[in-house]
Image: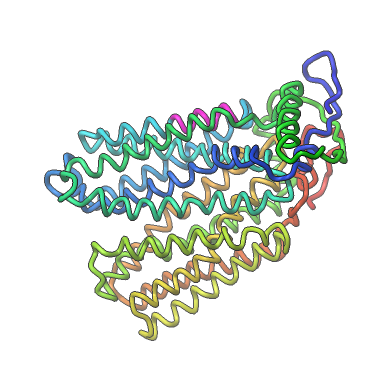
């Protein structure tokens, strides 16, 4: 319980973090997961739909004077640019003004931009709101991952974070299948079907926004910002609900922390913390994000061209193959997530990165030998991405828990922006050049680059990953506001 003090900027002693971590899994936690985590499904659906509607939008009668190259090139680059800038912009505000305000605002931005994309009447309008859609979704990554990690008990934090981030691929499956229906001109006119896909995204966002209004602010954030009475009320209400649900009293919490409350953290302090005090952890974050970004682009960016050029798969059927790949992506975090909390972060992060890289090297070798067809190539990709998806999701988990509370959202935003820029800008430029030549050797090289960077990240993780499993966030990285702050990395 927080010790009462009379004025703002106080020094308080609290056990609220320990009380949150000792809560058993309950309907209260499910409401948080549903309210916050489902937006990743929308992101996956959004990106997949845009990729699949490119050809239809470029056709006469679509309602837009746009080419397929502009959609996959300019539009995709603007979405990525929006996501990177949005992550940094909203990430900073999330640390200053709170998780709840920002996860409501960023979803509202995403909702409005998606709805306005549906009524695009000109190319510039479509491009503008693709940028703003990315601007909203980039902010979601910082606000949502911060809130989830700070509300979910330490015992479950790893698996929950991985599954939520992996749910992106459920949206990708839905987007692939939805686009098949929406783009069928026997069902919808050519200038209507693609608009309905964006409109559906806006409607689903509105539903999530209504649910999200009931998700509480992070008590950990409230404590540091001088609002311990609100933090106490949120935790006490959760405890009462869980005791009523289980019919048994909760065990006493163990551990208190003394903190000096503050209103905000300066950029100088953030930079000193991330790049000086925790430079090894920053190296880890860079490695994980860049490794997974290049592996994913080595496969997913050119998968359609590979299937059509080398295996004669009709372009209209590539969506079915992508749906299968997306299912493999989701199953990785779903089935392996628990091991990140039991076997441990270091073994599982390095293991998933190294194994997915090794499997992609093997896939490149089989492809170079001419031993694969469309089905077996897709099976190989599924095997690679089963492990890579768990690894990629653990990158978001890692940067959200290894830096202090006051820098958490900004740290997530920074590493997300670096990874997204690497994957969404330099990655496509490199891999488009390789996979579109129609030469086996060039595609093999693309696979080998992605596999090599993934393995390199896995080796970094083997040495630098933090054993954060089942540990309180405050033990993994001491808050800057703590009365006694550790001086070395752990």
Seen as rendered, the residue at the extreme top is: 6
Residue 130, how many percent across, how many down? 34, 39
Nearest the eye: 193 or 247: 247
The quadrant of the picture occupied by the N terminus is top right
Residue 319: which quarter of the image? Answer: bottom left
Nearest the eye: 342 or 290: 342
Number of numbered discs on residues:
0
For the question of whether residue 430 can be seen, the reply is no
The residue located at (28%, 48%) in the rendering is 71
Where is 124 relative to 421, above or below? Answer: above
The residue located at (44%, 36%) in the rendering is 135
Say whether residue 378 is left or right of residue 155: left
The residue located at (25%, 44%) in the rendering is 194
Say whether residue 186 is left or right of residue 50: left
For the question of whether residue 335 can be seen, the reply is yes
Where is 70 relative to 460, above or below? Answer: above
Residue 239, how many percent across, how many down? 75, 33
Seen as rendered, the residue at the extreme left is: 60
Say whether residue 396 is left or right of residue 401: left
Residue 342, how many percent across, how many down? 73, 60
Residue 457, how many percent across, how many down? 60, 63
The residue located at (35%, 48%) in the rendering is 76
Nearest the eye: 35 or 422: 35
Where is 334 relative to 114, above or below? Answer: below
Where is 406 relative to 76, above or below? Answer: above
Say whether residue 104 is magenta.
yes
Chain part drawn in magenta: 99-108
């Amino acid at each position: 319980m927080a010790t009462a003090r009379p004025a703002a900027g106080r020094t308080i002693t609290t056990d609220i973090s320990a009380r949150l971590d000792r809560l058993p899994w309950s309907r209260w936690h499910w409401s948080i997961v549903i309210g916050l985590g489902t937006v990743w499904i929308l992101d996956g659906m959004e990106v997949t739909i845009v990729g699949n509607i490119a050809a239809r939008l470029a056709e006469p009668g679509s309602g837009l004077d746009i080419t397929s190259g502009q959609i996959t090139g300019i539009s995709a680059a603007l979405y990525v640019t929006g996501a990177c800038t949005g992550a940094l912009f909203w990430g900073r505000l999330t640390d200053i003004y709170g998780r709840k305000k920002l996860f409501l605002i960023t979803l509202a931005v995403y909702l409005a931009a998606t709805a306005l994309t549906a009524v695009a009447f000109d190319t510039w309008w479509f491009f503008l709101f693709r940028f703003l859609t990315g601007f909203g979704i980039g902010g979601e990554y910082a606000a949502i991952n911060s809130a989830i990690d700070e509300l979910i008990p330490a015992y479950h934090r790893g698996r929950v974070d991985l599954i939520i981030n992996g749910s992106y691929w459920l949206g990708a499956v839905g987007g692939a299948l939805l686009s098949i229906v929406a783009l069928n001109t026997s069902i919808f006119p050519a200038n209507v079907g693609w608009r309905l896909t964006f409109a559906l995204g806006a409607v689903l966002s509105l539903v999530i926004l209504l649910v999200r209004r009931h998700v509480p602010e992070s008590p950990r954030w409230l404590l540091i910002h001088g609002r311990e009475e609100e933090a106490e009320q949120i935790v006490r209400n959760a405890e009462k609900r869980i005791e009523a649900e289980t019919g048994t009293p909760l065990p006493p919490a163990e551990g208190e922390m003394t903190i000096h409350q503050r209103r905000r953290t300066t950029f100088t302090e953030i930079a000193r913390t991330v790049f000086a005090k925790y430079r090894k952890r920053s190296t880890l974050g860079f490695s994980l994000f860049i490794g997974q970004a290049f592996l994913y682009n080595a496969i997913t960016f050119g998968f359609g061209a590979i299937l059509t050029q080398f295996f004669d798969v009709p372009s209209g059927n590539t969506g079915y193959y992508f749906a299968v790949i997306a299912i493999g992506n989701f199953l990785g975090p779903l089935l392996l997530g628990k091991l990140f909390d039991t076997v441990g972060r270091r073994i599982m992060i390095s293991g998933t990165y190294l194994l997915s890289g090794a499997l992609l090297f093997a896939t490149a070798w089989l492809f170079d030998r001419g031993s694969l067809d469309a089905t077996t190539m897709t099976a190989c990709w599924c095997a690679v991405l089963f492990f890579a998806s768990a690894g990629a999701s653990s990158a978001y988990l890692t940067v959200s828990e290894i830096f202090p509370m006051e820098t958490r959202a900004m740290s997530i935003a920074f590493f997300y922006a670096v990874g997204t820029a690497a994957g969404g800008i330099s990655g496509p430029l490199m891999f488009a050049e390789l996979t579109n030549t129609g030469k086996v050797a060039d595609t093999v090289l693309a696979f080998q680059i992605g596999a090599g960077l993934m393995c390199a990240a896995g080796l970094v993780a083997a040495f630098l990953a933090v054993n954060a499993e089942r540990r309180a966030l405050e033990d993994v990285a001491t808050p800057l506001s703590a009365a006694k702050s550790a001086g070395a990395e752990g």
